[in-house]
Image: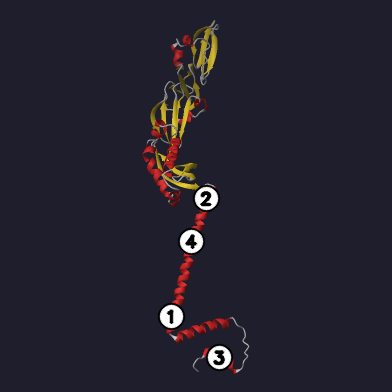
Amino acid sequence: MKKISVNAGQVALLFRKGDYRGVLTEGTHWINPFLGVIRYDRSKQFAAPMNLNILLRDEKLAALLTLVEVKDHEIALQYENGNFKNVLTPGRYTYWKGVTDYDFIKVDLSKIEIDDQISKDTLVQREVIQYVRVFVVESYEKGMLLIDGKFDRFLDKGIYYFWKNATPISVLKADLRHQQMEIAGQDILTKDKAALRVTFIAQYRVTDIEKALIDNKDHAKQMYVLIQLALREYIGSQTLDELLEDKDVVSAYVIKALKGKVDKLGIEILDAGVRDVILPGEVKEIMNQVLVAQKQAQANVIMRREETASTRSLLNTAKLMEDNEMLFKLKEMEYVEKIADKINSISLSGGGQLIDQLRDIFAPGK
């Protein structure tokens, strides 16, 4: 007989001429000296030295092992002592019991949904992420989940994980924020055949993502065309003067004309307006001439009005002085004072006669 010791955390398998003869656990054992011994560390995975099915016939050995069988459409998530360790692909795996605490979660990859027992921390592991499809819906978005081309459900903001398999999955997303569309440089003829270049601005938001993303293709492009047509329809029915008189009417008309149509696109127009109206060079020159003529006519009217008022004032003053001699003399003295302000010195000649004349002016009747 041969003495053999099996240490703690070890297992020994016995063989004779390649045939399995038994298993020895921790302790001291006496065995046939012709038996071969293979020792195993129970903290590590068990690698079968021969056909596993033959070994598992031994109930004592089978009780020491955990057998994990992963089918073709499956993977198994392996955890050691509560922490994620590895991904097991299709095959058979055996692990020793008793030293390391193993846990296994089998995943059916033919399904799409991920079980809640699998944490997101596990899903983002390098070994696992290759089996996962990830979709992100931002805080300002709303999504639609399509499975195999069919609508499944709406998705609010967040990160979504699905198993990767042959079933196609897609997520359509719509931006729910207020957005702005510019319809720039539209060449349009007015009713009186004046060529204009109009730039129009519209603010909108998506209100029904199913209509916007499923029922319609390129909802924003469709809205762009609808605004173009509404602009041409309205501007083509107005003369140049009517358009320039009140541009706000254009935006009101466009919003009203599009209301029912954009509802079918899942869109709501919040505001709209004409940003620029560009006239051709010759039309702009004519408009400038008309503006100058109008301003000149207004200036002439104002000058005539002021001249009339001044003449009327002079006439009233003359009538008052005609009826009141004292008022006439006061007015005469006012003009003499104004003349005197302009004179620095006076040289007199002619003797007393000149002095008498001045006395008659400033002190009449004395």
Q: Residue 311 at x, y = what percent?
A: 46, 73
Q: Please tell me which residue lies in front, 251 or 94.
A: 251
Seen from this angle, which residue lies furthest left?
Answer: 260
Q: Is residue 344 above or below residue 147?
A: below
- Badge 3 is on which residue? 357
Q: Quadrant of the N terminus?
A: top right
Q: Residue 315 at x, y = what percent?
A: 45, 77
Give the spatial CA distance, label 4 vs label 2. Answer: 20 Å
Amino acid identity at mark 4: Ala
Please tell me which residue is depicted at 46% across the width and 70% down the height of the picture: 308
- Badge 4 is on which residue? 297
Give the spatial CA distance, label 2 vs label 3. Answer: 68 Å
Secondary structure state at the residue bearing disc 2: helix
Please tell me which residue is depicted at 45% across the width and 38% down the height of the picture: 224
Amino acid identity at mark 1: Lys
- Badge 2 is on which residue? 284
